[in-house]
Amino acid sequence: MSSERRYSDEQIAAIFKMASEEQKKLDRDGSAGVGLTLAELQEIGGETGISSEAVARAAATFEHAEAEVP
């Protein structure tokens, strides 16, 4: 068995929330290109056991929502 530290689901969520908030502070300079592409999201999902199809379906909800905003 590996002696490497393992994190609970709650800890993982907190870690990524804190990291993303820190990244937002760094990105506040208004630079273009902030964010991730669908392919990048799918790659991250694949690394965490989430299928590319599931990520694409979830991302599609934002496509429809943005199209409806006046």
Image (spheres, rainbow, N blue to C red):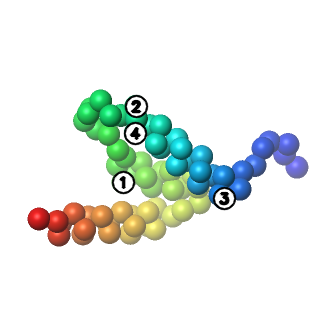
SS assignment at label 2: helix
Residue 9 disc label: 3
> Neighbour class for label 3 at 10 Å: few (<14), some, many (≥20)?
few
Residue 53 disc label: none
Question: Label 4 vs label 2: CA separation?
Answer: 5 Å
In front: label 3 or label 1: 3
Of 39 and 7, nearer the camera is: 7
SS assignment at label 3: helix
Tell me which residue sits at (72%, 51%) in the image.
7
SS assignment at label 1: helix
Question: Label 2 vs label 3: CA separation?
Answer: 26 Å
Question: Label 4 vs label 3: CA separation?
Answer: 22 Å
Tell me which residue sits at (53%, 56%) in the image.
46
Q: Amino acid at mark 2?
A: Leu
Task: State the image quarter where residue 56 is shown.
Answer: bottom left
Residue 38 disc label: 1
In front: label 4 or label 1: 4
> Neighbour class for label 4 at 10 Å: few (<14), some, many (≥20)?
few
Identify the residue position indicated by label 4 in the image: 24
**Residue 70 shown left or right of residue 38 in the figure:** left
Question: Earlier along the polypeptide chain: callout 1 or callout 2?
Answer: 2
